[in-house]
Amino acid sequence: MVKGIGWGIGKGLESRECARMAVQKALDCLGTTRPALAIALVSQDLDVQQALSGLTSMLGTTPLWGFSTAAPFSSEGEHSHTVLVGLVAGSDLKAQVNFYPEYARDSKTAGRQLSQSLQTAGEIGGVLFSADGVNGNFLPAASAFTMAGYPVAGCLVSGGYHLEMPRMIAGSQADAGALAAAILGGDFRLGIGVGHGWKPTGLRFQISRARDVWVQSLNGLAAAEAYSQVFGYSPREWSHPPLSTLVRLYPLGFQASPGSEELVLRSPLHVEVDGSFRMNAPVPEGESATLLAGDPHICLAEVGKTVQRAVAALGTARPLMALVFVDLAWRMLFAGRSKELIMALHTELGDIPMLGCYTVGQIARFHSTMLPQQLNQHLMVVLLGEEYH
């Protein structure tokens, strides 16, 4: 185990006891050292409020950040009825957590509140955040990060294939439709790497009609009908399970800028009954898009590259813990072979503890002068590090 890290897994049917068990195991790893930050992932099949009660009863005033999610994973594999806890300790590691419950109902207000928190936080080494991946608009929150000089990493969370409402956690608060942030200071550093294994098929669509986060027609046809002509199955079958959620396997790619070969991927959350695609980011009407498909072999090859990018971005800081945000499409692509993906991550990370989950969006700011970008379909590895002196 990496020095300065506490790690614990609590499994069972009693949510509060699972949380207490996980924290106790993590505290035992640290001995008498006081943690500067606690990170918790609560599996969706537990009662999050009860789990939070167990977490806070053990952690006291330690800043706590996390969320509930379907199938959280560690190097041991995917977990159910489980709370995963990671504790980070260091002599000059500082963290504060903030909770914005209005995110889904009023994203602009949440963005303004986040901006105020960042402006008064002092020197920032990085920011972690999680937000509802189905409801709310990330763009106003992104505009809060106008101060240059620190990386930003986060995820848009869902409850799994059926998009149940996840709960964000910050301090003693947990709720659906919220945004939770951990503002890191002192010697905390973040290193971010991203990658994906989706490649263009050669097929293109014109976005004939789009409204906000709905793609209504492609090439003049209802979106489901356009996919029906490419893949088979009837438009009605695309509008109902399982195809209505498996549609995420086939995202649309847009040119990042005129003349650029880089693509911005946008993935459907599901197909509506009327045949339109529900996204979680606006898609520009009138644009041309490339259809992409995933390749498990390319995805596995990207794991090592993504970890290497995160290590390089961390610079001279010592890696303490890895947060791994994997797009839900990867779980669909690997189906019953998710152990291969988790083993590849474990092999690349070595003895760095890993907390992982499946998400419907990944958020990253790689360069100090740019706003955070919303990604779909990516693997994101976030290394929490401690700067040497």
Image (cartoon, rainbow, N blue to C red):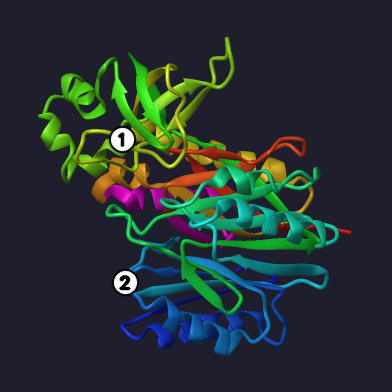
- Where residue 154 appears, as percent x and y from the top left, is 57, 51
- Which span of residues is magenta-colored? 337-357
Up/down of 221 relative to 152, above or below: above
Label 2: which residue? Answer: 45
Total labels drawn: 2
The label nearer to you, 2 versus 1, is 1
Would residue 335 be found to the left or right of residue 305 on screen? left
Say which quadrant the C terminus sits in: bottom right
Q: Earlier in the sequence, mark 2 or mark 1?
A: 2
Residue reaching furthest to the right: 389
Task: Name which quarter of the figure residue 372 lies in.
Answer: top right
State the SS at label 1: strand
From mark 2 to mark 1, how far is it between C-alphas?
Answer: 28 Å
Considering the whole magenta stretch, tell me its main secondary structure: helix
Residue 259 at x, y percent in the picture: 57, 9
Residue at label 1?
Answer: 277
Which amino acid type is marked by label 2? Answer: Asp
| Quadrant of the image occupied by residue 120 | bottom right
- Residue 2 within the segment the image draws in magenta: no
Q: What's the amino acid at mark 1?
A: Phe
Does 380 appear above or below 12? Answer: above
Depth check, front residue: 336 or 258: 258
- Per the image, label 2 sits on a secondary structure element best described as loop
**Residue shown at the point (61%, 57%) measured from the top left:** 110
Q: Is residue 165 visible?
A: yes
Does any portion of residue 319 appear in the rendered image? no
Where 243 falls versus 8 (above or below)? above
Place of residue 198 in the rendered image (x, y in percent of width and height, measured from the top left):
40, 29
Dot 2 crowding, Cα within 10 Å, few <14, some 14–19, many 20+: some
